């Protein structure tokens, strides 16, 4: 499994111009606010259209300016955990987790639905949120919301996982516990993962490799 990307995007204050290749590892992208970190994730996910470049995941071309390829976001098989988690507060934990499956054609076929349902239930068990399945997302703690969002991103079995400052909304007491849990879960991911952070401690804890971004360019 591998990911490679070359991205050019004209932004308001500077041009984003980056290229990188990675395997089944966790890459941390550091940098100040406004450096272009989230724009990279949004381009990979298909939310933002690059001006030029190419994105390849597992030898599958998701975007190519030259070849006029641009796979729709929902067909890219990319899991995305947003900074604010983007859970539906009036849905239960189970409904939030299963929401990630609703656009999968396989889930609408009886032959696959049972297996995919079991996988989602097992994912909730693995992340320690199965006991919260029938609670509304608005009624759970910050650390629990983080795990629900991660489960939703993972149930589709993505080829690439994107994490945009997933710990920044947690209070300091909760962070320590969630850090430990994520360290354990990281060992089981087995897929290319990109984590954005401005917290150097998180880089030291989680990174297999890390890069520093400044005004749209990799400086180290």
Image: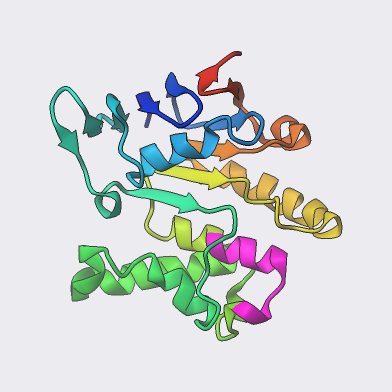
- Is residue 176 toward the left or the right of residue 113 in the image? right
- Is residue 85 toward the left or the right of residue 74 in the image? right
Residue in the image at 47% along x and 73% along y? 96
Instruction: Say which quarter of the image contains residue 48.
Output: top left
Looking at the image, what colour scheme do you see? rainbow
Point out residue 103 in the picture as x, y percentages from the top left corner: 27, 65
**Above or below — where is 56 with respect to 159?**
above
In the rendered image, the quadrant that contains the N terminus is: top left
The residue at the far front in this view is 12
Residue in the image at 59% along x and 34% along y? 34
In the rendered image, the quadrant that contains the C terminus is: top right
Which of 146/206 is in front? 146
The residue at the far top in this view is 220
Residue in the image at 74% along x and 30% along y? 204
**Above or below — where is 154 with respect to 138?**
above
Point out residue 192 in the picture as x, y percentages from the top left corner: 46, 36
Residue in the image at 45% along x and 34% along y? 40
The residue at the far right in this view is 173
Which of 215/136 is in front? 215
Which of 194/67 is in front? 67
Task: Evaluate whether residue 127 shows in this view.
Answer: no
Magenta-colored stretch includes residue 146: yes
- Is residue 65 toward the left or the right of residue 38 in the image? left
Point out residue 166 in the picture as x, y percentages from the top left corner: 63, 51
Please report the bounds of the magenta region as a residue range. Answer: 138-149
**Above or below — where is 131 with respect to 170?**
below
Point out residue 145 in the picture as x, y percentages from the top left corner: 63, 67
């Amino acid at each position: 499994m591998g990911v490679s990307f070359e991205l050019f995007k004209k932004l308001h204050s500077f041009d984003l111009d980056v290229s990188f290749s990675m395997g089944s590892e966790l890459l941390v992208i550091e940098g100040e606010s406004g450096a272009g970190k989230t724009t990279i994730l949004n381009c990979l996910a298909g939310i933002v259209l690059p001006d030029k470049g190419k994105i390849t995941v597992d030898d599958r071309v998701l975007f190519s300016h030259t070849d006029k390829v641009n796979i729709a976001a929902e067909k890219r098989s990319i899991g995305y955990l947003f900074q604010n988690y983007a859970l539906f507060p009036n849905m239960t934990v189970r409904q939030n987790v299963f929401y990630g499956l609703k656009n999968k054609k396989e889930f609408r076929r009886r032959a696959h639905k049972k297996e995919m349902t079991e996988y989602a239930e097992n994912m909730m068990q693995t992340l320690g949120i199965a006991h919260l399945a029938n609670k509304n997302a608005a009624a759970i703690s910050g650390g629990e919301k983080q795990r629900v969002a991660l489960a939703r991103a993972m149930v589709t079995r993505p080829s690439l996982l994107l994490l945009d400052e997933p710990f920044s909304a947690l209070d300091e007491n909760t962070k320590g516990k969630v850090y430990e849990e994520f360290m354990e879960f990281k060992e089981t991911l087995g897929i290319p993962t990109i984590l954005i952070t401005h917290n150097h401690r998180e880089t030291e804890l989680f990174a297999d490799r890390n890069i520093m971004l400044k005004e749209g360019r990799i400086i180290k």
